[in-house]
Amino acid sequence: MAASLTLDALTKRYGDGPPVLDGLSRSFVPGTLTVLVGPNGAGKTTLLRLLAVQAYPTSGTVRYGALNIHERPYRYLQDVGLVHAGPELPEHLTAVELLEWILRSRGQWTDDEGPARIDALLNRLRLDERRENLIGTYSSGMVQKAQIAAAFVAEPAVVLMDEPLRSLDTATTEATAKLIQAFVEEGGLAIVASHQTDALTPFADEMVRLGEEESEASTSPQSTRPGQQ
């Protein structure tokens, strides 16, 4: 089960420059989708990098439940699925090999169930005939599909996604949105930075706009989901 992610006075600056994030305090709770919006340079990718322990805060803390994620990153990241801002996948593997490696590294691989789990996810994301080809030969859209599959294949409790809908066709955009929606409805915690919000807004719980005073980042509740009152 997911735990809450809690930011306490989180600040990040690079060198002597002004802070990209300044004293940001808030919580993200299980069973919710938060969409980060704002112009380029507003701090969306910086925040996701901090939450993914790809960067360390200048000051402040991030806790996953009671766990300080920057003190015990390995334990925390076992529960996390990531979609990076850029294509950071091993080009010498196929999509199938990549997903198998992730399952094995998290102790979830079995010869009986592993291949079926991989096939079902790649089918859902419409990565079909070239899934056995090397990732280095993929188009940008195929790489993005593989990234999304890599984020979800180990059934994480938390997903952190930076522009996950980039380079996707309409059908795969809809499939990805449904995958995120199902993940949240099953109790997952999702934080997504995206300029393409139309597919996510109908089931987003909160839109957080960065690039203002981060300690007072504007939020707006979602419109009521179907079936909710």
Image: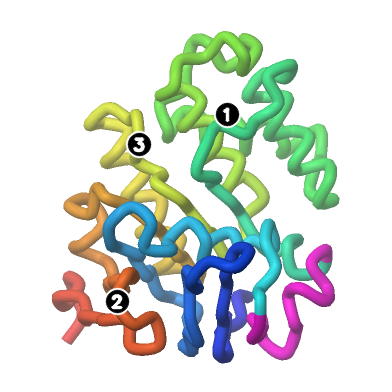
Q: Is residue 229 visible?
A: yes
In the image shown, does 126 or 91 lie closer to the viewer?
91
In the rendering, at what x and y percent does residue 98 appear?
Answer: 71, 30
Please indicate whether residue 198 sits to the left or right of residue 79 in the image. left
Sequence-wise, the earlier of marks 2 and 1 is 1
For the residue marked with disc 2, what is the amino acid?
Glu
For the point 75% across and 61% down, the residue is 78
Q: Position of residue 140 (x, y in %)?
A: 44, 22
Classify mark 1: residues with Cα within 10 Å, few (<14), some (14-19) or many (20+): some
Residue hosting label 2: 212
* Amino acid type at mark 3: Arg
Q: Nearer the viewer, residue 58 or 98?
A: 58
Residue range corresponding to the magenta coloring: 59-74
Would you say residue 66 sits in the magenta stretch? yes
What residue would you read off at disc 1? 119
Tag 1 and tag 3, C-beta contact below 8 Å:
no
Which residue carries the number 3 mark?
166
Q: Secondary structure at mark 3?
A: loop
Q: CA distance from mark 1 to mark 3?
A: 23 Å
Quadrant (top left/top right/bottom left/bottom right) for the N terminus: bottom right
Instruction: From the image, state whether disc 2 or disc 1 is nearer to you.
Output: 2
